[in-house]
Amino acid sequence: MQIFGHIEGHSEGVEFQNRSEIKSSGLHKYHIAGISRILGVGSDCIILNGGYVDDEDYGDVILYTGEGGRPEGSPRQTFDQPFTKGNLDLSKNKFTGDPIRVIRGPNLREKQYAPKDHYRYDGLYFLEYYWPETGIDGFRIWRYRLVKENSSLPPLRDPNQHPARVSITSHRIQRDPNIPRTLKLKYDFTCQVCGIRLESNDNPYAIGAHIKGLGTPHNGPDSEDNMIILCPNHHYLFDAFAFSMNDDFTLIGMEGVLTKKNNHSINIECVKYHRDLFERANH
Amino acid sequence: MQIFGHIEGHSEGVEFQNRSEIKSSGLHKYHIAGISRILGVGSDCIILNGGYVDDEDYGDVILYTGEGGRPEGSPRQTFDQPFTKGNLDLSKNKFTGDPIRVIRGPNLREKQYAPKDHYRYDGLYFLEYYWPETGIDGFRIWRYRLVKENSSLPPLRDPNQHPARVSITSHRIQRDPNIPRTLKLKYDFTCQVCGIRLESNDNPYAIGAHIKGLGTPHNGPDSEDNMIILCPNHHYLFDAFAFSMNDDFTLIGMEGVLTKKNNHSINIECVKYHRDLFERANH
């Protein structure tokens, strides 16, 4: 499974001789492209190696350039970078908060950050913004501001005594990104509560919300039958116990019925669990 | 200004003799209460010191108990914990993602994490979930699952060579929490685009969105005239360049006009900046 965050066995600072070694490590999916994608979900890793003249590397802050806009093999841009593929998937991290592994290569212009003759895994960054601008060749480029996870402080305790820590990716529990991706397609990104379908730049957006939370103490399963597709507004309201649902999917706390496709079965035990929390929160 | 995240001059691991010293440091606002609040915005700090029997400390994961539900001075709970004050403000960190400073005290039951005879600042945690449950005395308690920021890895570079790092709080730019708080009250938490007002447990929720982004390269101001109040759905669409607005606040990319109160002036240069990005993104 392709995942976000650190990958066990490959600590920050680890070095690689070439792109093949990086691909084999699982840190980055491709041989050539800079942006490693979890298709339709986000980007798990980027490589910075001087390929785009507009890149700016300040160490803890990176202004990264999207891909495309130039014929294969050409260093010059001859058309607008599209908002598709890697550029689109990288943008999604702004809204999910998923961390991006950053690998620096030897051809980086900013020599103070460039490893010598090899590649180096430099840990996790978060995507703070993305935006379009006009590149030096006069065509649109997509730009991404990445900020390093705060790791300037030594660990409090010996991590070897706390193996639980290695399973924490940033501050989120590791979850399978394929589950919400598949379920969103089943609902064509429409909210199961209100039917709204958000779209920007021809790309739809929705959230796969766990009904019973993952991790201690809820220990809900990371599976499709413990997930519903919601717009951000109803995701907030669901997580804040403003509404819940009965076993027949009629809503409690608001009018209506949850829309449910036949090819999406929902675990009623998870529904009961959420409803119980809703009732305690509102009694 | 009370802020989220690390406070300069007080590194993780720093020790304090008593609560007065902690209060003077600026890490925690109060002398007695466990939950330090940025009123109406979130919690910036909590103290764990064995005060609530339901607390569970696993080091990198904490199951924290909310406040109240018992008469002053009593260790036993005689009524439900309300979802107000510290309990309410701490819950907001789930939706904002703001980090919470954790301070452990000498009376912690879990002795392996307890400092001896003093208090210790243990760095930043994120609130992953909160939920109500029934405590051992039979009344409702609010519970908070906090997970430590991933700091198990050594820093890549000498932080002294990169002073920029100290101004990074987690992965977010430091911003004044009072600005969105005041502006939300002006709009009574209704979205300036669609007029929706989300509410859960009698508490309204909205997002203060910067029109021109903070930080490099946008360098928008952290001020009320660069902010609008949006519901989560329109916040997503605004940040994803699905719509923007003209100088007269009519919307572009969707029907309608931005609602604007007379006591809220908006910086038109910031509006132009966003509109320019919108046009590049959609041409």
Image (tube, coloured by chain):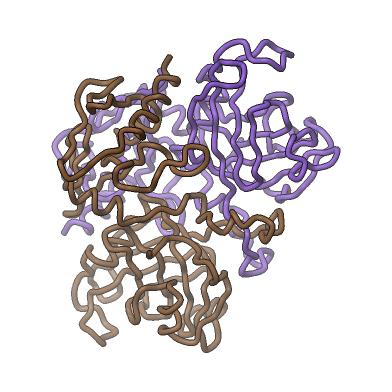
Chain colours: A brown, B purple
Quarter of the image with the C terminus of chain A is top left
Identity of the residue drawn at 19% across and 51% down: A185
Can the viewer see residue B102 in this picture? yes
- Residue A190: image location, x then y, percent: 19, 42
Would residue B8 appear left or right of B187 to someone viewing this image?
A: right
The number of numbered badges drawn on the structure is 0
Nearest the eye: A169 or A87? A169
Residue B2 sits above or below residue B160 on the image: above
Q: Indicate the quadrant where residue B180 lies.
A: top left
Identity of the residue drawn at 18% across and 74% down: A79
Residue A113 sits above or below residue A278 on the image: below
Residue A127 sits above or below residue A277 on the image: below
- Residue B106: image location, x then y, percent: 80, 36
- Residue A87: image location, x then y, percent: 29, 65
Quarter of the image with the N terminus of chain A is bottom left
Nearest the eye: B266 or A161? A161
Identity of the residue drawn at 77% across and 47% down: B14
Can the viewer see residue B186 in this picture? no
Would residue B249 appear left or right of B23 to someone viewing this image?
A: left
Identity of the residue drawn at 49% across and 25% down: B132
- Residue A269: image location, x then y, percent: 35, 33
Q: Indicate the quadrant where residue A259 lies.
A: top left
